[in-house]
Amino acid sequence: MAFSAFVSFFPQLVAGPIERATNLLPQFYTKRYFDYSKAIDGIRLILWGLFKKVVIADTCSIFVDDIFQNYINYSGGTLIVGAILFSFQIYCDFSGYSDIAIGTAKLFGINLMTNFRTPYFSRNIAEFWRRWHISLSTWFRDYLYIPLGGSKSSKILTVRNIFIIFIVSGFWHGANWTYIIWGTLNAFYFLPIFLMKKNRKHLNTTTKNKFIPSFKELNSMFFTFIITAFAWIFFRSKTVTGAFEYIKGIFNQNNFFKIQTAKTYELDIRPLIIYLTFFIIIDWYYRNEEIVFTNHNLTKSTIIFKYIIYLFTIISIIFSIKNQASNFIYFQF
């Protein structure tokens, strides 16, 4: 009975987090009672997940689809915007689903593992992969990388193992050369950090005890985000040729600094900029927490401010529902 519940537990069945029996199965043997605090945490996660998906990801998709389909008609500056927006789209789309799944499970008294830990605040690509799709990354580590010898083999074999897990990660997303190149590119990103023995450098949260990061940390986060967004171009493009043409278009000097909005839908991009700014601030503020909107030492003024944030989040979701909805990206993988 418990095993049947494990394999059919619907919140994480379609796209993750990819739970293991050692974590999830024992919870079905435990008698559970309604836990108000856990239920509230679950609702918070569902609310934030909906905001990520409906407000950020689905709104970004309108511009991203138009830019990637008509990249020949756009300036280099617009293509850069398209790559950046897709980076936020895929992150908010998948982490939004994960938050909804984890939050829903909490309503049933079940704890699922955290799948994302603010990956775009990473200071190098190794830290990024410790924070992105954690359940899949750790699965590849435990069931592919370590059985191959991990980092305990010779340096040549270790480099081979690194390329294997990244290429397999790309192949896992689909039998398309664009995914293979995306995985290989990330392997090349990771390799210098590994060879310089800096892959375990950033294990703590970014700027854990301060609100404002140092210039060095900010520069590292910006560089990591840029190379990640560059790799996402291959992930998003339908063909390798299309990806290279898109990249070539970025460096087109004609109207490079002219940013155009989506012609197909004739939408104003300014509301999306407001939503993204709000999202980045909230994601940064709660980067040390497992759950957004967690209560800590609330005063009367902070309680009022928190309810204003709740209200803005809910209103944004309601107003964004009228836009064209799109399926979760990771449903296809």
Image (cartoon, grey):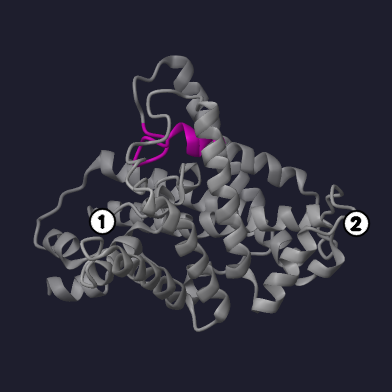
Q: Nearer the viewer, residue 141 or 284?
A: 141
For disc 1, the marked residue is 108
In percent of width and height, residue 213 lies at 50, 27
Q: Is residue 40 magenta?
A: no
Dot 1: element:
loop
Q: Nearer the viewer, residue 8 or 262?
A: 262
Q: Is residue 140 left or right of residue 163?
A: left
Q: Is residue 136 above or below residue 204?
A: below
Dot 2: element:
loop
Q: Does the image show residue 18?
A: no
Tag 1 or tag 2, which sits nearer the N-term?
1
Residue 254 badge:
2
| Residue lying furthest right | 254
Q: Are marks 2 and 1 in contact (CB under 8 Å)?
A: no
In percent of width and height, residue 103 lies at 35, 52
Q: Residues within 10 Å of mark 1 (few under 14, many from 20)?
A: some
Q: Is residue 138 left or right of residue 263?
A: left
Amino acid type of the residue that numbered disc 2 sits on in the rendered structure: Asn
Mostly what secondary structure, the magenta segment?
loop
Q: Is residue 120 above or below residue 90?
A: above
Amino acid type of the residue that numbered disc 1 sits on in the rendered structure: Phe
CA gap between label 2 and label 1 equals 56 Å
Q: Nearer the viewer, residue 172 or 214?
A: 214
| Residue lying furthest bottom | 175
User: Which of the 4 image quadrants contains residue 62?
Assistant: bottom right
User: Which of the 4 image quadrants contains residue 236?
Assistant: bottom right
Residue 61 badge:
none
Q: Which span is picked out in magenta?
A: 281-294
Question: Measuring 51% from the left and 75% from the top, which residue is drawn there?
Answer: 180
Q: Does the image show residue 132?
A: yes
Question: Measuring 32% from the left and 46% from the top, which residue is drawn there?
Answer: 200
